[in-house]
Amino acid sequence: MATASPALVRVADKAAMAQAAADRLIAQIAVNPGRIAICLTGGSSPKQLYELLATDACRARIPWARVHWFIGDERFVAPGDPLHNMTVARHAFLDACAPPANIHPIPTDTAAPEAAARAYERELMAFYGADKLDPARPLFDLVLLGIGPDGHVASLFPGFPAVDVSDRWVVGVDKANVTPFVPRVSLTLPALGSCRTMLFEVAGPDKRAILTRVLAGENLPAHRARSNHHTILLIDAAAWPETSLDRSPPELPQALIIMGVAGSGKSTIGETLAQRLGWRFEDGDSFHPPANVAKMSAGHPLTDEDRWPWLQAIADEIARCRANGERIIIACSALKKVYRDILAGNRDDVRIVYLEGSQNLIADRMRHRKGHFMPTGLLDSQFATLEPPGGDEHPITVSVDAPVEAIVDGILQRLRIGQGRA
């Protein structure tokens, strides 16, 4: 299966990164009503995330009895050692939150790393229910990773044989390329890639140089580590490369997301724009599960837990269209930046069109609209939730206080279509 380019999401600092990672982890859990598998990572990057997951606010949003926790690599030291990755995660949140049977450490009490690798591989296969990975049935719901100073991921180091292993799920690594110089056990790239979402955390000025190399396509493990479905890089301001990513978006995108509060005219504008461009149009409301529609029809605002499966369904459709070279326009409220990160991230070929209007104007429109399930009383909550897109999202912002054709003309002009440049 071909892998799509990763979504690049810029955050302010490490605290914002931890919150963004927690939101995405919880969102991925919410999509799966069954048994869930999360693959954690070691190193310093996830420490704040793990501490955040232990807070009351996050604990209440995770169905702990259904979530199983694995680890992407382990240092071959005894459990309880400060260098032991799963011990760090256990102390930070797992022991306080997760059932013991749902915690799956790599056994480091074996004679050698290779014996531990074989044992963990058997455990993963037993959990998965097969000894072959099926691209259509990921092993993990989410894999969390960092990027090492040499471009390694998990304990797969540049130039080491373990990077190229494709017929194993777990391998022993006799020596490390960076400190601490202890043997390791690591999942392989195929096992790490067998996930619905691969989520990187990249923070600090010391990661800027290696991230630039990774994003430039250098043959490093961090460049080769990709999910078969969705890969997201959370990058803080200190690690964000100064030149390689601060670029203008292309003139003709693969997908347009028409966003705004209820009543801003997303569907009307989207349909008209699709007719003018000859693209396919989808109303994001059609991706809502019936429970969400019933909740909104009863006058109750949706929670983030309600929205995650909806947003993921739209993101999946956008990814499918991008992979097939199909252009699409989707109307979706996408009120928060975290929602838009799921839908668009920093993909150059997915653009946000923001329909901007005052609350009084849109309320008046809603009072005259029939056949829609969003009561006007929920408009207050929509505006309270709204986070208008910032410049880093390269939005096309247009006022809704104009005729439909004029609004569409304005969008086309911003896309520079019809001016000999498309």
Image (cartoon, helix red, strand yellow):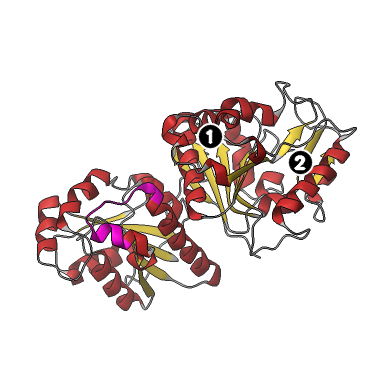
Q: Position of residue 181 (x, y in %)?
A: 80, 26
Is residue 414 depicted above or below 82 in this figure?
A: below
Viewer-proximal residue, 238 or 378?
A: 378
Residue 403 magenta: no
Helix, strand or loop at mark 1: loop
Q: Amino acid at mark 2?
A: Ser
Disc assigned to residue 199: none
Who's the residue at 76% across and 47% down the image? Answer: 123
Q: Position of residue 22 (x, y in %)?
A: 48, 39
The residue where tag 1 is placed is 239
Give the quadrant of the C terminus.
bottom left
Q: Amino acid at mark 1?
A: Ala
The residue where tag 2 is placed is 186
Residue 304 magenta: yes
From which residue to which does the magenta span run?
Answer: 293-305
Farthest right residue in view: 111
